[in-house]
Image: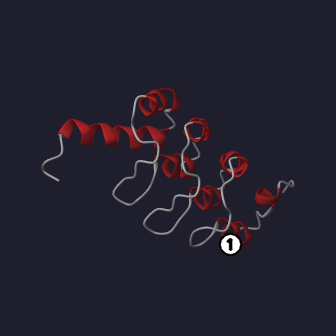
């Protein structure tokens, strides 16, 4: 790790912060210029996972437009869709479902999470 350029480490931390805080207008150009859209932090969380979990719908949309993997699991086996359901981020859930996120990947899966919280309507497109 000591061989890493500290400026790159700082940039990576900034990208993760932008995903959490909803900085779509700043984050998207970095991805357009070469920051990997599926870059992960030390826990395996992608930019999409962090944005989804923190309810940053604009950032989720920007990352999806740039090809973010909707089903990439973190090191705990969690998907962005399950995280968004768990946190009650309905708009983010709708974006992920529309982008083709698989409700059955991960542990617990998004379907299991939605069942637990009586929110299956988010996965089948009906009103809750």
Residue at the outermost left position: 2
Q: Locate residue 57: give its quadrant.
A: top right
Q: Tell me where residue 120 appears, x and y as whole percent.
A: 78, 64
**Tag 1, which secondary structure?**
helix
Q: Locate residue 66: give its quadrant.
A: top right
Q: Residue at x 18, y 45 (%)?
A: 4
Residue 115, placed above or below residue 123: below
Residue 82, placed above or below residue 97: below
Residue 103, placed above or below residue 84: below
Q: Tell me where residue 8 appears, x and y as whole percent.
A: 25, 38
Asked whether, in this view, residue 34 is left or right of residue 54, the answer is: left
Camera-nearest residue between 55 and 36 = 36
Number of residue marks: 1
Q: Residue at x 51, y 52 (%)?
A: 49
Q: Quadrant of the C terminus?
A: bottom right
- Disc 1: CA contacts within 10 A as few (<14), some (14-19) or many (>=20): some
Q: Residue at x 18, y 40 (%)?
A: 6
Asked whether, in this view, residue 69 is left or right of residue 15, the answer is: right
Camera-nearest residue between 66 and 9 = 66
Q: Residue at x 57, y 56 (%)?
A: 80
Look at the image and name its color scheme: secondary structure
Asked whether, in this view, residue 124 is left or right of residue 29, the answer is: right
Q: Tell me where residue 22 appears, x and y as whole percent.
A: 52, 37
Residue 66, placed above or below residue 82: above
> Which residue position is annotated with label 1?
112
Q: Tell me where residue 73 appears, x and y as whole percent.
A: 50, 62
């Amino acid at each position: 790790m000591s061989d890493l350029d500290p400026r790159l480490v700082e940039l990576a931390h900034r990208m993760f912060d932008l995903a959490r805080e909803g900085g779509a207008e700043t984050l998207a150009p970095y991805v357009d210029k070469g920051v990997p859209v599926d870059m992960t932090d030390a826990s395996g969380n992608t930019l999409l996972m962090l944005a989804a979990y923190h309810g940053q719908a604009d950032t989720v949309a920007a990352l999806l437009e740039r090809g973010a993997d909707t089903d990439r699991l973190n090191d705990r086996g969690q998907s962005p869709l399950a995280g968004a359901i768990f946190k009650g981020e309905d708009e983010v859930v709708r974006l992920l479902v529309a982008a083709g996120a698989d409700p059955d990947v991960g542990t617990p899966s998004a379907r299991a999470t939605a069942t637990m919280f009586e929110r299956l309507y988010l996965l089948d497109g009906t009103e809750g």
